[in-house]
Image: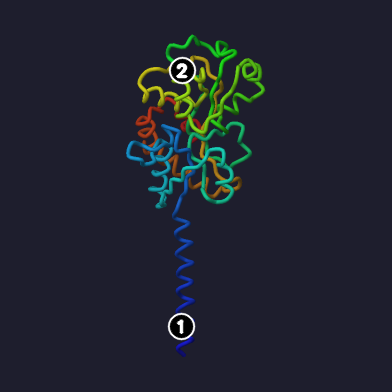
Amino acid sequence: MKKRIALTMATMMLATALTGCGSSKEETFTVGFDANFPPYGYADESGEYTGFDLELAQAVCDKEGWTLVKQPIDWDAKDMELSSGAIDCIWNGFTINGREDAYTWTDPYIDNSQVYVVAEDAAVNTPADLSGMILGVQKDSSALAALNDEANADFKASLGDVVEYDDYNLGFMDLEAGAIDALAMDIGVAAYQIESRGTGFRMLDENLATEQYAVGFLLGNEELRDTVQSALYELYEEGVVGELAEKYGLSDFLCMEKYK
């Protein structure tokens, strides 16, 4: 009898443990992001991860009753992180254009452009002025994809060299030191970097490319995508998205009104 009771209790404990694990997983939402991509995702002065995308993800979790897990990732390893289940989505200034069939996407929420940043006193006013010069981009970034696009083949061929960085902070250090002549990057990131650094840099008027940001899920994960999408539109109607966009200087780039 004692053995039977012990066996029953062990079975109940195992069932409870398994149920608890399942519940925890359902309530946890893990967002993969580049921790060096302000204003969308970055570490603030206290070392806490924050940014427009992360605060928006938190707002979605608050609405759904989920616990947000902020998971910094190497940007060039994002596909492995997603396919392995280490993260539930990629949410960090993630460009949909050219990747439409590679992920399951929410509707776009930000209109973005790829721009050129140069030193404030550089004798560079148009992309054509960069002929023979060195351009920096982030590895596996939208700027790099745009640069490699056939439409920009002549421009790329005119450059002296292209240097790829793990993150744009390193790129700005080299630009300031004169090791490169320009950086190609997202306009929101460029605006944030230029403002936060005070003086020394400016954007060219002519863009490299235009694109849109959305949240990317593993291909076929429509159920989770639909839940997040619905929450995002509710947050937009409630004014939360607009407030966050204003906080991070992104109001001019919001495009959710086109799709809701």
Whether residues under marks 1 and 2 lie with C-beta atoms below 8 angstroms apart, the answer is: no
- First of labels 1, 2 by sequence position: 1
Front residue of 108/132: it is: 132
Front residue of 118/13: it is: 118
> Which amino acid, mark 2?
Met
Residue drawn at (51%, 48%) of the image: 87
The local secondary structure at tag 2 comes to strand
Residue 205 in the image, given as x and y percentages of width and height: 49, 14
Is the residue marked by circle 1 packed among few (<14), some (14-19), or many (20+) residues within 10 Å?
few
The residue identified by callout 1 is 6
Q: CA distance from mark 1 to mark 2?
A: 71 Å
User: In the current view of this chain or complex, which residue is farthest to the top?
Assistant: 123
Q: Which mark is residue 257?
A: none
User: In the current view of this chain or complex, which residue is farthest to the bottom?
Assistant: 1
Residue 84 in the image, given as x and y percentages of width and height: 57, 50
When asked about the image quadrant of residue 43, the answer is: top left
Residue drawn at (47%, 77%) of the image: 10
Residue drawn at (47%, 48%) of the image: 30
Q: How many numbered marks are there?
A: 2
The local secondary structure at tag 1 comes to helix
State the colouring used for the structure image.
rainbow
> Which amino acid, mark 1?
Ala
Q: Is residue 64 above or below residue 132?
A: below
Is the residue marked by circle 2 packed among few (<14), some (14-19), or many (20+) residues within 10 Å?
many
User: In the current view of this chain or complex, which residue is farthest to the left?
Assistant: 46
Q: Which mark is residue 203?
A: 2
Residue 13 in the image, given as x and y percentages of width and height: 45, 73
